[in-house]
Image (spheres, helix red, strand yellow):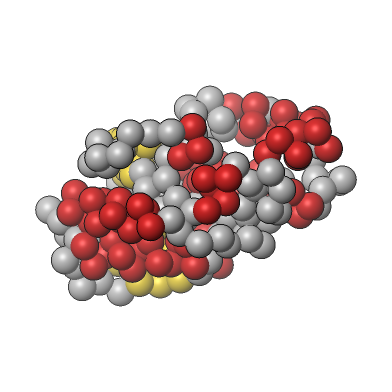
Amino acid sequence: MRHGKTQWNLEGRFQGAGGDSELLTASYQQMIQVGRYLRPVAFQHAYASPIKRARVTAQRVIKAAHQRVPLTLLSQLEEFHLGKLEGMAFTDAQKQFPEELAAFHDHPDQYRTDRIGGETFEEVIARMTPAIQRIVAANDDPQANVLVVSHGAALNAEINALLGTPIADLRKRGGLRNTSLTILETTDGGQTFNLLDWNNTSFLTAAATPTDTI
């Protein structure tokens, strides 16, 4: 699950692991809607990025789902570290770093961080995948469900990587909306994953806007 929408999301600003603007008031209602949707699903454990917007989203969703499950915070689930892009308006970043932004959005295999700092797609995947594998190993009941709450760009990269998507094609499924759900299934201990649902927001009553999705 991607966290709820924040002020920087609304303003069209880069918000990586080094930035954490406030969640919008409307996002709390959407967290309740997600939780209600998930009530029929019995979760064994929940995991979240420790960054406030993801942590609070996880806490509110678990509460709204009427579930008493442990919540573990894992730094490996943080958003991309974005270096100089952190907090920049998309329009300003486009003027200053056009090549990097073009690669970030459309050609992940060509994304370089020499000028801006932060992490590449390969580096994000390299830190997230072991965390996902540990989560799978810790919840080895074949019927176990776990909730993972993280961030748009990092989730997009990691989910696609778990599905075996080449780095160059990571963005081809499109973006993830705030408070969206994507469902993966593994039946072999996390060696392979199947995609059951992508960017599901059917439970949200608010109409989507361009700033909802990354």
x, y percent for residue 213: 48, 37
Front residue (pair 57, 125): 57
- Residue that extends furthest to the right in the rendered view of this protein: 115
Front residue (pair 96, 118): 96
Left or right: residue 18 versus residue 42 is right
x, y percent for residue 135: 40, 62
Identify which residue is drawn at 79% across, 52% down.
84
Identify which residue is drawn at 30% across, 74% down.
70
Front residue (pair 126, 121): 121
Asked if residue 49 shows in the view, the reply is no
Measured along the vertical axis of the image, is residue 201 above or below residue 1? above
- Residue that extends furthest to the left in the rendered view of this protein: 40
Identify which residue is drawn at 87% across, 45% down.
115
Q: Quadrant of residue 44?
A: bottom left
> How many numbered markers are drawn?
0
Measured along the vertical axis of the image, is residue 66 above or below residue 116? below
x, y percent for residue 57: 38, 61
Measured along the vertical axis of the image, is residue 203 above or below residue 76? above
x, y percent for residue 160: 50, 37
Left or right: residue 48 versus residue 161 is left
Identify which residue is drawn at 36% across, 43% down.
180
Front residue (pair 90, 1): 90
Asked if residue 42 shows in the view, the reply is yes
